[in-house]
Image (cartoon, grey):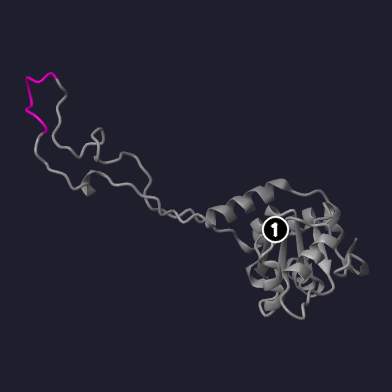
Amino acid sequence: MDLQVIDINNKKISQIDVSDVMAEKVNKKILYYAVKAARNNLHHGTAKVKDRSEINKTNKKTYRQKGTGNARHGARRANIFVGGASTHGPRPRSFSEQVNKQFKKRSYQEVFKYLIQENKLKVLNEINFAKASTKEAAAILAKLELIKALVVLPAENETAKKSFRNLKDVGVVNEININLYDMLRYDAVVMTEEYFKQVKERYAL
């Protein structure tokens, strides 16, 4: 199976040979669990409410034990009173999910399989700018017929990063920070031929 390499004018330059596995049916179950793990790892888990031991209110009885016709209450810290504690509320905890190397490799295979089959992966021979220019970056995406896209760039390519990052609905990430969730969140993924060859070797595409 071949993957086209294009230039910034959306003209075919060459092609890259990828495994026939990329033509097989996408395993959506793997994508589901991979995305779930990625989203949970973004969850800070810092939500917290105060329980009765953390409420600073008097321990004095609200009213006498008997004769009022009301239920017995020992303190204003109870959850039914305004300013009282919360019961069964959220407490700080970790939502992180660990995935092993084998599953990670397989999940990236499935992501690239999905992107290639749906024609959502654009591999450019190069992405270079003489100087930062948002207008030029917008023109490139227009020629590629893309609106909402994720652009993957080398960390040292600052001019290209500055050019793309001001565009609406366009995400820019360094090659070392690429993640599965972002790749599926956008309508398309744009990367260089050089980087795709690294990914191809890393995940056996």
Tell me the SS state at disc 1.
Answer: helix
* Image point (83%, 57%), residue name: 145
Tell me the crowding category of disc 1: few under 14, some 14 to 19, or many 20 or more residues within 10 angstroms, Cα based.
Answer: many
Q: Is residue 63 magenta?
A: yes
Relative to residue 130, is residue 175 drawn left or right?
A: left
Q: Is residue 2 magenta?
A: no
Specify the quadrant of the image occupied by residue 135: bottom right
Residue of label 1: 183
Q: Position of residue 107 (x, y in %)?
A: 69, 57
Quarter of image, res 165? bottom right
Q: Nearer the viewer, residue 17 or 192?
A: 192
Q: Name the residue: 80% across, 60% down.
A: 121
- 91 relative to 161, above or below: above
Residue 134 location in percent, x, y? 72, 69
For the residue pair 37 and 132, the one nearer the viewer reads as: 132
Q: Is residue 87 left or right of residue 148?
A: left
- The amino acid pointed to by label 1 is Met
Image quadrant assignment for residue 193: bottom right
Q: Along the horizontal axis of the image, is 51 left or right of 166?
A: left
Rendered residue at 78%/53% (across/down): 114
Rendering coords of residue 77 (x, y %): 20, 40
User: Is the C terminus in the top left, top right, bottom left or bottom right quadrant?
Assistant: bottom right
Q: Is residue 91 visible?
A: yes
Which residues are drawn in magenta? Answer: 62-69
Q: Is residue 155 above or below residue 86?
A: below
Front residue of this view, candidates 46 and 104:
46
The reply to whether residue 97 is in sight is: no
Quarter of the image where the N terminus is located: bottom right
Considering the whole magenta stretch, tell me its main secondary structure.
loop
